[in-house]
Amino acid sequence: MVYYFTICYCMFISFSACVGQAQYSDDAYKRTQRIREETLQIMNRATEPFENYKNSAQNLIYILKYHYEEEKKRPQNKKNTELLAQLLDEKQGKLHLFLELWKENEKLPVFTVVEQRKHIIHIFDNMLENEKNKSQ
């Protein structure tokens, strides 16, 4: 009986070592911080005509999609890829919908920008917190 439990325990330890813990990446953390700042800077401009920032908005989406693809490659990073999807999804993504609203209305009221920023900040803060909590 003890032999059986010993074998099971060894198998469990071996399996756990293969699965491993998600690894902290300073590069991913810093990249997320930079993208967060770029996103908020562009959102702050939404009280001005969209046409003036159209290229910046398109570049931001490109950068976020690239970041999403890079994050998908990292093991055990499902939470952050799901959070990025919450920004980018073309039907329900918070940032995507914000940019579409800005484009349609040409300018947005300050109140709308402030309220939408709260949602975006929350998503980015969760991504940064997830990364920080990974084993180093």
Image (cartoon, grey):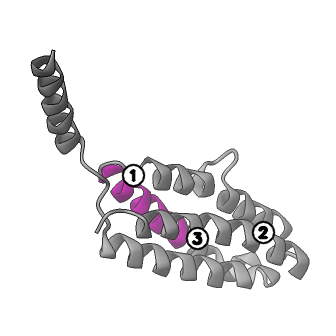
Residue found 85% across the figure and 75% down from its top: 108
Q: Residue 71: which quarter of the image?
A: bottom left
- Residue at position x 51%, y 68% from top? 129
Closer to the camera, 127 or 10?
Answer: 10
How far separated are the C-alphas under marks 3 and 1? 15 Å
Amino acid at the residue labelled 2? Gln
**Label placed on residue 77:** 1
- Which of labels 2 and 1 is toward the front? 1
Look at the image and give the residue range highlighted in magenta. 59-74
Counting labels gives 3
**Element on which disc 3 rests:** helix
| Nearest to the observer: residue 50 or residue 4 | 4
The residue that mark 2 highlights is: 116
Q: Earlier in the sequence, mark 2 or mark 3?
A: 2
Residue 84 falls inside the magenta stretch: no
Say if 103 sits above or below 85 in the image.
below
Residue 125, numbered label: 3
Q: Quadrant of the C terminus?
A: bottom left
Amino acid marked by disc 3: Asp
Task: List x then y, in percent, for residue 86.
Answer: 61, 52
As helix, strand or loop, the secondary structure at mark 2 comes to helix
Could you tell whether 132 is left or right of 102 in the image? left
SS of the residue under disc 1: loop
Report how far apart the C-alphas of labels 2 and 1 lie in the structure. Answer: 25 Å
- Tell me if residue 4 comes above or below residue 50 in the rendering: above
Q: Nearer the viewer, mark 2 or mark 3?
A: 3
